[in-house]
Amino acid sequence: MELDENEFRVGTFHGRHDGAPVEVTATRDDTRSEPYTWTCTCGVTRSFTTEDAVFPTAWRHTHPGRLDWLRQWAARLLRTRHPR
């Protein structure tokens, strides 16, 4: 991931979700109203005003719990079913 000139990396998380390996990069940019952001290789991005929520949400995104796994399983099941 290429960082902007005013951004710097504050953390990287490696994990899996939806059956694929993913990498989340957490950054900080003091020029934005929400300076803390994480971006996943799956395309999801979240921004925060403080550092408090960045690491727990990035970790959960790369390491989903049982409820998250169940939601992902149900979504995959519904995607693979074809209407008759």
Image (tube, rainbow, N blue to C red):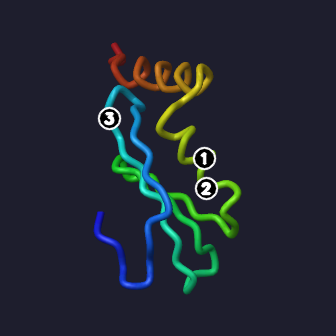
**Residue 29 spot, x, y in % from top left:** 52, 78
Mark before the other along the chain sequence, 3 or 1? 3
**Residue 21 spot, x, y in % from top left:** 32, 35
* Residue wearing tag 2: 54
The image's mark for residue 21 is 3
Horizontal relation, residue 18 to residue 33: left or right: left
Q: What residue type is labelled 2?
A: Val
Which residue does the image show at 59% across and 74% down from the upper left? 35
Q: Is 76 rendered above or below residue 7? A: above
Number of other residues with Cα within 10 Å of mark 2, as a class: few under 14, some 14 to 19, many 20 or more: many
Q: Distance between the residues labelled 3 and 1?
A: 17 Å
Q: In which quarter of the image is the N terminus?
A: bottom left
Q: Which amino acid does label 3 sit on?
A: Pro
Label pair 3/1, CB-CB below 8 angstroms = no
Q: Distance between the residues labelled 2 and 3?
A: 20 Å
**Residue 51 spot, x, y in % from top left:** 66, 63
Q: Is 49 rendered above or below residue 32? A: above
Q: Is mark 3 on a helix, strand or loop?
A: strand
Which residue does the image show at 53% across and 64% down from the upper left? 37
Q: What element carries label 1?
A: helix
**Residue 63 spot, x, y in % from top left:** 50, 32
Q: Is 15 rendered above or below residue 66? A: below
The image's mark for residue 5 is none
Q: Which residue lies furthest to the left in this view?
A: 2
The image's mark for residue 57 is 1
Label pair 2/1, CB-CB below 8 angstroms = yes
Q: Is mark 2 on a helix, strand or loop?
A: helix
Q: Which residue lies furthest to the top in this view?
A: 84
Which residue does the image show at 33% across and 20% down from the upper left? 80
Q: What residue type is labelled 1?
A: Thr
Q: Distance between the residues labelled 2 and 1?
A: 6 Å
Mark before the other along the chain sequence, 2 or 3? 3
